Image: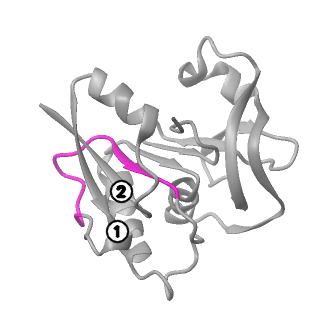
Amino acid sequence: MRKALVIKNIGIEGPGTFGDFLMGQGYEIVTADLLTGEKPPHFSEGFSPVVIIGGPMNAYEEERYPFLRDELMLIYDCIKNGTKVIGFCLGAQLVARALGANVKKNHAKEIGWLDLQLTGDGIASPLFEGIPETFRVFQWHGDTFDIPENAAHLARSNVCVNQAFLYRDTALALQFHLEIS
């Protein structure tokens, strides 16, 4: 059986509808809840995809949340070995950091169901096939990321320009909460 690894940064956030999708595709889901002290594996071997969920901390708070270093190491390993990695919100920011992009405070917070617009790369991407150019997603964040070098910028909103990117068909970062149930 195929295994997906889900990294939780806080107990109340989980894979939601994305987990349902994976199970429907025949995946076994293995979770690690880092805030409770569980450790993620240092290597992605045996898992694909690795899913990094959101949390209330910031992607640059390793001093306060040392487990973020472990997550970054796991993401590096995924990218290096071609293991699919998907990040939602904080997870997307960690993927951006692992790829050398800056993560910082956005000029405004986005909270609630808000419109998202696909970019030209997003419209052309098979990931968004059949989805309208503008659609509603759930947002809950105050930070944003720069698009990493050699990544395709897939989506934006009126409040936060960088909402999604794809790096080499391996790393998908979604600032919004597609997984919310």
Q: Is residue 38 left or right of residue 138?
A: left
Quarter assignment of residue 122: top right
Neighbor class of circle 2 (other Cα within 10 Å; few <14, some 14-19, many 20+) is many
Amino acid bearing label 2: Ile
Q: Is residue 50 above or below residue 144?
A: above
Report if residue 124 lies within the magenta region.
no
Numbered disc 2: secondary structure: strand
* Relative image position of residue 156 (x, y in whole percent): 77, 40
Q: Earlier in the sequence, mark 2 or mark 1?
A: 2
* Relative image position of residue 67 (x, y in whole percent): 38, 76
Amino acid bearing label 1: Leu
Nearer the observer, 109 or 157: 109
Residue displayed at 49% across by 82% down: 62
Question: Label 1, on which residue?
Answer: 34
Furthest toward the left, the residue is: 1
Quarter assignment of residue 163: top right
Q: Is residue 67 above or below residue 19?
A: below
Report if residue 43 lies within the magenta region.
yes
Residue displayed at 74% across by 44% down: 112
Residue displayed at 56% across by 80% down: 61
* Relative image position of residue 19 (x, y in whole percent): 36, 35
How many marks are shown on the rendered structure? 2
Nearer the observer, 123 or 93: 93
Residue 29 in view: yes
How many angstroms separate mark 2 from mark 1 (CA)? 7 Å
Residue displayed at 78% across by 52% down: 110
Residue contact between numbered discs 2 and 1, judged by CB atoms under 8 Å? yes
Numbered disc 1: secondary structure: helix
* Range of residues picked out in magenta: 41-54
Mark linked to residue 93: none
Nearer the observer, 63 or 137: 137
Question: Label 2, on which residue?
Answer: 7
